[in-house]
Amino acid sequence: MSQAELLASNRKTLFVEVILPLAIAKNYTYRVPLELNEKVKVGCRVIVQFGKNKIYSAIIVALSEEAPLQYEAKYILDVVDDDPIIFPNQIVLWNWISEYYMCFPGDVMQAALPAALKMASETKIMAADDPTLDRSQISDKGYMILEALDLAGELTVNDVIKILGQKTVFPLLRSLFEKGYILISEEIKEKYKAKTKAFLRLASIFNDADGKRELLDSLNKAPKQQDAVLAFMQLQKTKTDISRQDVMEASGASASAITALIDKGVFDVKEKVVSRFEGTDVLLSPDFTFNEAQQTAFDQIKFNFESKDVVLLHGVTASGKTQLYIRLIEECLATGKSALYLLPEIALTAQITERLKLHFGDKLGVYHSRFNDNERAEVWHRVRKGDFQVVIGARSSVFLPFFDLGLIIVDEEHENSYKQYDPAPRYHARDTAIYLGHQHQAKVLLGSATPSVESYYNAKAGKYGLVELLQRFGEAKLPEIQIVDIAEAGRKEEMFSYFSGTLLKAIQTTIANKEQVILFQNRRGHTPFLQCGTCGYVAKCVNCDVSLTYHKTSNLLHCHYCGFSEEMPQTCPACGLPHMQSKGFGTERVEEELELLLPDLRIGRLDLDSTKGKHGFDRVISAFDNQEFDVLIGTQMVTKGLDFGNVSLIGVINADGMINFPDFRAYERAFSLFSQVSGRAGRRQNPGQVIIQTYTPNHRILEQVQQHDYEGMFMIEVTERKNYQYPPFYRLIKLDVKHKDQDLVNDSAIRLASLLRQQLGARVLGPEPPLVSRVRNNFIQTITLKIERKDISISKVKDLIKQSILHFDLDKKNKGVRIQIDVDPY
């Protein structure tokens, strides 16, 4: 471009269409000051004023020379970035999510961008805690901000605007942030902490022969300690790292004997970072080789990728799927492309990272909500620059700025953790990943031991490729599953609290064999609800339509929906009699009862309560992995792909709650959950055993779990769903109508359902109250739409829904009523 043409372009009046991080229906258009014409680019952030005094950083999605017709465009205040922070294909992805999941573009922006990249008036600024930073290198205005932070500790962007007397502060803040002087954050979350293990070393004064002889002589009166030292010396001949557990197993000494030797200064303790996957050397070795079944599956996956963009890998638990993933990623990287590895849980991300680090080193980036906002922003920039060629993360990883994806792996694709329920966008990461793969012309591999009915149906119908890996890796065999009838055991007086004689005996045998046990109870807390034995009063939450759960650790009644808590009543608030009775049982109660029955057991608990706080999850898992616990009692957390080499017994305390849950996916989820938790047993050479306690021992789901019959479960489920109009044959869209006034919610929901029926007829069901019909003092009515997949345009249906909601919102009778839309609400 000539100098004259450049000057002419700079004199043009430009307008930018931007996405604001707000729940507004349309993108907004702003005018660009002439001096900023050269700086504005699609994908860059600009500083704009919206509303009376609010300042936001917005993303440019389009440039034009046409002014908006309906309103006068305000000027942008500044441009934050020299280069775009998001790519055009990300804007396309955001628009798809906005349209498919019926939410606002600003909702998607809020979910997609790390907080440090979407600064607004109320964003918090803090000084970095780094004494080595040289403040003499920054501008006077930057120094003023740091001095103010030294005094106040924390400032908002509005505070900075007032201190400097100007609105264009974002570029300065960005500069300070990138140089490490400040932290920008809405909430600092805990970091993932690597697993460490304590190893023993003989104190240096005992290293020579004379020292060792004197040491053993001094322990003549403590034979157990002497045995422990002798065992340690023997182990030194074959091992470099010797743990407390190694010495205890080799010598028969107790934990207290080892502790006494440490206290005497005989042993030094050294913490060392280790992998969580000890005992899986074949998996950790960088030059592993496939077994025959894995090689066949690998070849089939590659063959299917020639004709299909999406392939489903149906591989039983412990079949070695991770090795297949690693080889596929290596091949993808060899072509110069990048790979995304999605996992449903932060905990799994933390576990499997160590495996992948061995293979991909600094090419591997990790992205999940356990990182703080500044770390997430750093990962974002490094993915954008191509520093990370492999990214492993939870569902939000689909939003990262990839520019050359070749492979997406969605592990445990059946998990409902991939679905975001609140807030909007209520997207499903698996389905979003498939669209992302389509955008990049990348291949997508879905992996699971118990695939979702929808994915398996798509594979059977030929939409996806299907590869099956149905034998466990190495010598490991699928566990033997035994069903115990609780009612029958009760009649024979073989129930001891919540444990059948069969399960108790199996626990004792397992511990005697120095192996470990996992017990599964899908309810946390101590007592699910308290009821008066005289008048029937149940303690309920004041804000939600649910009973309060008693937690022994806090000695309080808690609401699991809104967090409300209150003290345990000594007498019934209704009739005044002291007859409040515990009903049901959670993980705390199971732990308490097992301690009474088998007092010598070392018991750990893995649920939302026991894993709160800094590194809570990691602490419990590491302790169990190090065999500090004999038994681990947990909720669904224990089912999610965790790998423990010494677990040989799984006990399901009561299967009926999962099976009888009122949801069309209850049987599928129950099968998946019981199969997954069973898969934690016998993952090495030792055979595994699973005991499931139930009042309905002949239930078809339990029989199918016992026979590892996924195909049988699928055939019955898919037939019933076709008959009753559920996915995968029909789409579901759920509309929740909410307000604090119950009568208004009921009337408004009837009006909305009527508007929808005018357009969609019998496809509209409800309104009706959901299982929990009041949350945080908002009453809820639910309208469900069942839309057939064949011969109907889903985009046309969504347009009709939007029109009906617009008419609803314009009616003053519905003032203040909120409508929450959830597409594919399962």
Image: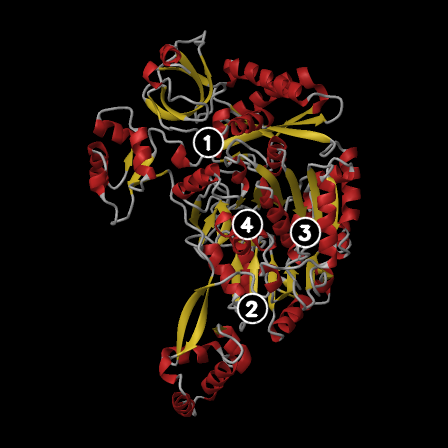
Residue 824 in the image: state x and y as whole percent.
63, 32
Sequence-first disc among 1 and 4: 1
Left or right, 403 with reference to 184:
right
Q: Nearer the viewer, residue 346 or 669?
A: 346
Q: Which residue is mark 1?
A: 110
Disc nearer the start of the sequence (1/3): 1
Mark 1 and mark 2: Cα distance apart in space: 44 Å
Q: Amino acid at mark 1?
A: Gln
- In the picture provided, is 40 more to the left or to the right than 715? left
Q: Earlier in the sequence, mark 3 or mark 4?
A: 4
Residue with the most extreme top position: 69
**Residue 357's x, y, as percent?**
52, 54
Q: Choose between 712 and 306: the one closer to the eye.
A: 306
> Disc 4 marks which residue?
531
Q: Does residue 1 sit above or below 475 in this rendering?
A: above
Q: Which of labels 1 and 4 is toward the front?
A: 1
Look at the numbered disc 3 and give the secondary structure of its residue: helix
Secondary element type, mark 1: helix
Q: Locate residue 31: give its quadrant.
A: top left
Residue at mark 1 to residue at mark 3: CA–CA distance: 39 Å
Whether residue 324 can be seen here? yes
Q: Are marks 3 and 4 in contact (CB under 8 Å)?
A: no
Q: In the image, which is nearer the foreground, mark 1 or mark 3?
A: 1
Residue in view at x 36 percent, y 14 percent: 3
Q: Amino acid at mark 2?
A: Asp
**Distance from the alpha carbon under mark 3 to that under mark 4:** 21 Å
Q: Quadrant of the N terminus?
A: top left
Q: Which residue is mark 2?
A: 630
Name the residue beneath numbered marker 3.
656
> Mark 2 or mark 4, which has the lower sequence index?
4
Q: Nearer the viewer, mark 1 or mark 2?
A: 1
